[in-house]
Image (tube, coloured by chain):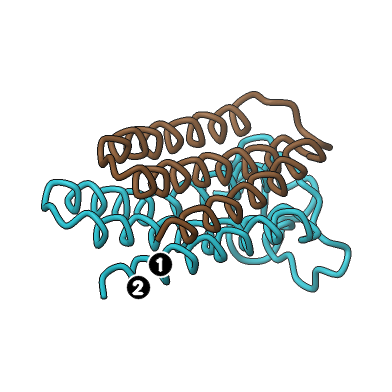
Chain colours: A cyan, B brown
């Protein structure tokens, strides 16, 4: 029974990682590529870690499997956020069919400073002068 | 059980090759960092599957340590990109 469960989880995890890799090659821009790799890759690696925890029945191996699962699931969103932010700030081009990029007008690229509301007028680029 | 491990490894190696294509193609450094992160994740999965295949749970420790260091490498690359790397514009 546990062998069958292990086999199913191993194959499902590997196929999810393969989907993530196909997305990394086929998707048109950085953010869409991260959308494919981060979620499918983390879920696939987590499934494979859980499969090993089921296969080795001893508790010390299961603890390691749970540790790998927790670490992958906890760090994948943080790493994706940091790369996405860095890629956006360094001007990675978006797909030409992108419909909305509301952040672009509110981004002061020199100081890594974001402000909300309507975009500032030219010549009014210093917040301290306005007060 | 044996052929399942071999089939899983074959699928993972195919995914590794596809990610290598993205690593070579780029075009920006952030794309390559995304590809490197996925390669580290696939390496973790390969180590876990290998531990199952040969029946030695000691390889799980290697996978755990690699998962830890890959996250640190990704964070380092992201900080480098934001604080002083070359920009595309």
Identify the disc placed on residue B82. Answer: none
Q: Looking at the image, do the residues carrying marks 2 and 1 touch, with CB atoms under 8 Å apart?
A: yes
Residue in the image at 11% along x and 52% along y: A59
Q: Mark 1 lies on which chain?
A: A
| Nearer to the camera, A39 or B51 | B51
In the depicted structure, whether residue A63 falls above or below residue B37: below
Q: Mark 2 lies on which chain?
A: A
Indicate left or right for B15 with A11 as reference: right
Indicate left or right for A112 with A23 as reference: left
| Nearer to the camera, A56 or A111 | A56
The image shows residue B60 at horizontal and vertical percentages of 30, 40
Instruction: Pick the quarter of the image with the C terminus of chain B.
Output: top right
Residue in the image at 63% along x and 38% along y: B33
Q: Same subunit under labels 2 and 1? A: yes
Report crowding for label 1: few under 14, some 14 to 19, many 20 or more residues within 10 A (C-alpha): many
The image shows residue A34 at horizontal and vertical percentages of 62, 56
Number of disc labels: 2
Q: Mark 1 points at which residue?
A: A7
Q: Is mark 2 on a helix, strand or loop?
A: helix
Residue in the image at 62% along x and 36% along y: A111
Report crowding for label 2: few under 14, some 14 to 19, many 20 or more residues within 10 A (C-alpha): few
| Nearer to the camera, A119 or A114 | A114
Identify the disc placed on residue A4. Answer: 2
Residue in the image at 68% along x and 46% along y: B19
């Amino acid at each position: 029974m546990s062998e069958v469960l292990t086999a199913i989880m191993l194959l499902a995890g590997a196929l999810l990682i393969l989907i993530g890799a196909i997305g990394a090659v086929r998707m048109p821009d950085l953010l869409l590529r991260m959308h494919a790799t981060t979620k499918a890759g983390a879920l696939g690696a987590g499934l494979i870690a859980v499969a090993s925890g089921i296969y080795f029945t001893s508790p010390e191996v299961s603890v390691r499997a749970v540790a790998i699962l927790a670490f992958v699931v906890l760090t994948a969103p943080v790493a994706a956020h940091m790369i996405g932010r860095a890629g956006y700030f360094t001007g990675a081009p978006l797909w030409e069919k992108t419909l909305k990029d509301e952040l672009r007008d509110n981004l002061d690229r020199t100081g890594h400073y974001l402000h909300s509301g309507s975009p500032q007028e030219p010549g009014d680029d210093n917040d301290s002068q306005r007060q | 059980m044996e052929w399942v491990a071999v089939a899983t490894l074959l699928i993972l190696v195919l995914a590794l090759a596809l990610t290598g294509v993205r690593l070579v193609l780029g075009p920006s450094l952030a794309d390559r960092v995304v590809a490197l992160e996925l390669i580290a994740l696939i390496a973790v999965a390969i180590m876990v599957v290998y531990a199952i295949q040969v029946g030695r749970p000691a390889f799980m420790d290697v996978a755990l340590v690699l998962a830890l260091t890959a996250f640190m490498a990704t964070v380092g690359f992201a900080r480098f990109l934001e604080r002083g790397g070359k920009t595309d514009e």
